[in-house]
Image (cartoon, rainbow, N blue to C red):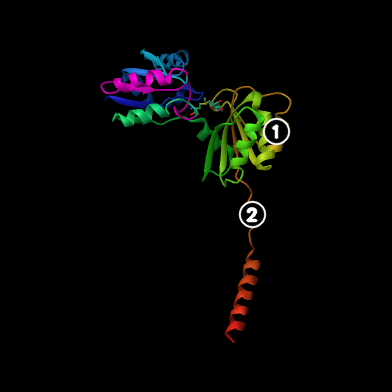
Amino acid sequence: APGLYIVATPIGNLSDLSPHAADVLSKADMIAVEDSRVTAKLLAHIGVRKSMTPYHDHNADKVRPDLIARMAGEAVALVSDAGTPLISDPGFKLVRDARAAGRAVHTVAGPCAAIAALTLAGLPTDRFLFMGFLPAKAGARASALAEIAAVRATLVFYESGPRLHAALAAMAEGLGDREAAVSREISKKFEETVTGTLSELAARYADAPPKGEIVVVVGPPGEPEAASEADLDAALKGALERLSVSRA
Ligand code: SAM
């Protein structure tokens, strides 16, 4: 059926491409892609030959109206190089404009590095804040961290190897020395998850920047000193005593 199909693709292991995703890609009239060389490999893996049109940060504004027009009569799929489109990847404006034009919008849910890392970290998942990539410059990074230091949620960051040490050190400084996990190369040959406090992890990655793709998951801030049951009892007792005194 015509419309827009947001299709998640593997973040490493090609077998993670779902049968639903393969079906939608094989039936699409056109596939909008970040990098046609990357998507060509995926399509070859499922035996699909298809016309691809580039859709990335540098040409999106220009090609978007044409894609929206084509969705009236054609099935247009959007994929990114890896994982779920729109998540630290292009696509949000395409969905926004497709909706505004009354086109059907479908999603084929699948791999996402942020969610995969949350499942590996062993940190609370009931509330999390996805932060994408922190700014590269130290000042802007510190401000971004200061802005979220009080948020009572697990935090998820995308990072690169060369920046990992500086980012972890800045997090330890700006967020406090919380429990954290560094997941690297998820679903690939050299997959690894290292856990520890932010300062321990910063020390571990101080010498040699790790290779590959990285997600940092940081636990929520520590609970403020909780009032003990004995404290509550004493407070209640005091209040009751004052009540009876004032009644008398
Ligand atoms: N849209 C993608 C998704 O759904 O995860 C993310 C795109 S973003 C441009 C790429 C970043 O995602 C990488 O720099 C890395 O931080 C993270 N990432 C992607 N694949 C990963 C993997 N296999 N292991 C760890 N992190 C990964």
Horizontal relation, residue 91 to residue 240: left or right: left
Task: Tell me: residue 11, above or below residue 120.
Answer: above
Number of numbered discs visible in the structure rendering: 2
**In the figure, residue 185 lies in which quadrant?**
top right
Question: Residue 188, position in %: x, y?
Answer: 55, 24
Residue at the location (65% across, 41% down)?
175
Front residue (pair 219, 3): 3
Q: Give, as a three-letter code, the residue at label 2.
A: Pro
Front residue (pair 231, 196): 231
Which quadrant of the rendered structure holds the N terminus?
A: top left
- Local crowd at mark 1 within 10 Å, few (<14), some, or many (≥20)? many
Q: Which mark is residue 44?
A: none
Which quadrant of the rendered structure holds the C terminus?
A: bottom right
Residue at the location (57% across, 42% down)?
154
**Start and end of the magenta stretch?**
58-87
Front residue (pair 56, 74): 56
Q: Which mark is residue 224?
A: 2
Q: Is mark 2 within 8 Å of ligand 1?
A: no
Q: Which mark is residue 202?
A: 1
Horizontal relation, residue 247 to residue 203: left or right: left
Question: Residue 178, position in %: x, y?
Answer: 66, 42
